[in-house]
Amino acid sequence: MSALLELDGVEAAYGPVQALFGVSLSLAEGEVLALMGRNGMGKTTTIRTICRMLPHLRGQVRFAGRDLAGVPLHRAAQMGLGLVPEGRRCFGPLTVAENLIVAARPGDWTLPRVTEFFPRLGERLGQAAQTLSGGEQQMLAIGRALLTNPRLLILDEATEGLAPVVRQEIWAAVGRLKAQGMSILIVDKALADLRGIADRAVILERGRDVWTGSMETLGGDEATRFLGV
Ligand code: ATP
């Protein structure tokens, strides 16, 4: 089966500062892949290159059979890359409904389906996004990405800064998306939670992939060596 997303030897830089030195990974349709690594190892940068916020210098990024080199940022979402960015980035003064529909594209995910998926959003459609709790804002960020009807959902630190009980709500939502067949790339530090949801993991160290395998084969040695846990 051909991969939905495939990175091969990707290198990227912020001006003169190189951050990725060769990242390769692949994600099959319907798979949940965890992208892991300690702080500053290149996880967010990898996501930025996938979503075309940062052009790559060398290597290949392929999505749904297309080479993404030269694809501009605004085309990435149209092609089916649905990013839930680090820090959630909701439009605070806009209402929940406005936040949800701002980037909506036709498809199976409609406003009623999103509010059925996250009932708490449905109860707050007219409320300004900045008045939501952290967990609700995260649901809003995920709901907004779902309404773009992505082929791949990318979650960058979706549970960061949330209370444990709220984190579990977000993980449960991700689990329901997985059960519905969604392809998902997750960056998160919560190894124990990822074990319950990801099929495979890729670990980055200093801008390179240094370990790839199924979640079951990610043992204590790798966790200590590469993740510091
Ligand atoms: P974290 O877990 O802390 O979010 P990360 O694995 O996502 O870390 P990146 O944010 O991708 O790591 O950072 C990779 C490297 O690129 C780091 O050395 C970082 O300092 C550098 N970097 C990230 N963003 C920029 C930027 N806008 N300008 C210059 N360097 C950057």
Image: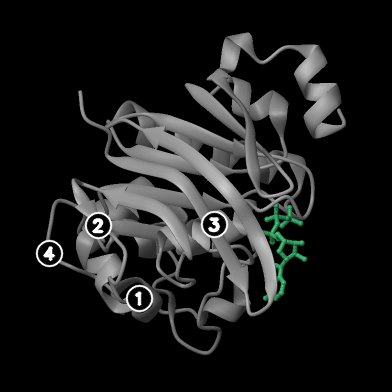
Instruction: Between residue 116 and residue 7, name the one nearer to us.
Output: 7
Residue position for label 4 = 106
As displayed, is residue 184 above or below residue 39? above
Q: Mark 3: give few (<14), some (14-19) or many (20+) Cα within 10 Å.
A: many
Q: Residue 124's spot in the image, x, y percent?
A: 45, 69
Name the amino acid, label 2: Gly
Q: Residue 170's spot in the image, x, y percent?
A: 56, 43
Q: Quadrant of residue 222?
A: top right
Q: Secondary structure at mark 3?
A: strand
Q: Earlier in the sequence, mark 2 or mark 3?
A: 3
Judge from the rendering whether residue 182 lies leftward or rightward of residue 23; answer left or right.
left
Residue position for label 3 = 11
Q: How far, Cα to Cα, is label 1 from label 3?
A: 18 Å
Are the residues at dot 2 and dot 4 in contact (C-beta closer than 8 Å)? no
- Residue in view at x 29 percent, y 61 percent: 68
As displayed, is residue 182 above or below residue 63? above
Q: How far, Cα to Cα, is label 2 from label 3?
A: 23 Å
Are the residues at dot 2 and dot 1 in contact (C-beta closer than 8 Å)? no
Residue position for label 2 = 80
Name the amino acid, label 3: Glu
Q: Earlier in the sequence, mark 4 or mark 3?
A: 3
Task: Point out which mark residue 73 bears.
Answer: 1
Q: Residue 229's spot in the image, x, y percent?
A: 86, 28
Name the amino acid, label 1: Leu
Q: How far, Cα to Cα, is label 4 from label 3?
A: 34 Å
